[in-house]
Image (tube, grey):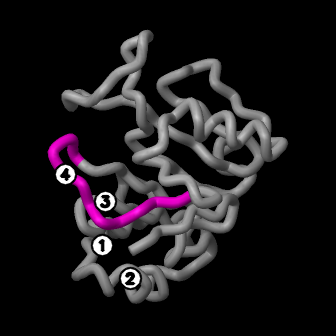
């Protein structure tokens, strides 16, 4: 199975702008998702599920529509059949530096002031390399591979 990262439109099968019902239907093929309604602490709805060891969450803010999708890589001892692809590169199996170099070659500006959380403003595509797991690390102590990726609309970081 493949989850396709398509910034700034979403992560297939979930697209930004989908309603709660559409989002639940799209991810239900993997099993029953958990739906967390907005409350006083968290001012947004959240749909959370897992696809063969890959975590998947959709945030529904404005008008109860999807405004961001986050995908988490597998635990260190898992090797899921699912690929999470950005232009054909698996973001959890391709070294993070290669993913960032690819983004730069595409003409995207990569803000890597925080090497643990680089992002591409305007697209919006954000990565993390934080984990407490025992994973391969580079010379700076960072995980070699990304541990999560977020896709949102162009104004997500501005809020």
Please identify, in this view, whether the residue under mark 4 or under mark 1 is nearer the observer. 4
Disc 3, disc 2: CB below 8 Å?
no
Q: Position of residue 77 (x, y in %)?
A: 15, 45
Question: Where does the magenta region start and end?
Answer: 75-85
Question: What element does badge 2 sit on?
Answer: helix
Residue indicated by mark 1: 35
Question: What element does badge 1 sit on?
Answer: strand
- The tag on residue 54 is 3
Residue neighbourhood size for the residue with mark 3, other residues' Cα within 10 Å, grouped as few (<14), some (14–19), many (≥20): many
Residue indicated by mark 4: 78
In the picture, the quarter occupied by the N terminus is: bottom left
Please identify, in this view, whether the residue under mark 1 or under mark 2 is nearer the observer. 2
- The tag on residue 24 is 2
Please identify, in this view, whether the residue under mark 4 or under mark 2 is nearer the observer. 4
What residue is rendered at 59% in x and 74% in y? 15
| Left or right placement of residue 79 versus residue 57 in this view | left
Q: CA distance from mark 4 to mark 1?
A: 25 Å
What residue is rendered at 44% in x and 38% in y? 146
């Amino acid at each position: 199975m493949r989850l396709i990262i398509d910034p700034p439109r979403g992560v297939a099968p979930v697209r930004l702008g989908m309603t709660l019902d559409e989002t639940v239907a799209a991810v239900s093929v993997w099993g029953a998702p958990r739906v967390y309604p907005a409350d006083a602490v968290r001012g947004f709805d959240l749909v959370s599920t897992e696809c063969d060891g890959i975590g998947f969450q959709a945030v529904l803010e404005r008008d109860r529509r999807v405004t961001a999708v986050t995908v988490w890589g597998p635990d260190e001892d898992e090797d899921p059949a699912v690929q999470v692809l950005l232009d054909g590169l698996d973001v959890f199996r391709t070294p993070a530096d290669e993913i960032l170099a690819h983004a730069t070659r595409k003409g995207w500006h990569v803000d890597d002031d925080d090497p643990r959380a680089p992002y591409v403003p305007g697209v919006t595509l954000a990565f993390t390399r934080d984990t407490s797991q025992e994973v391969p690390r580079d010379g700076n102590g960072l995980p070699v591979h990304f541990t999560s990726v977020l896709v949102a609309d162009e104004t997500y970081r501005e809020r």
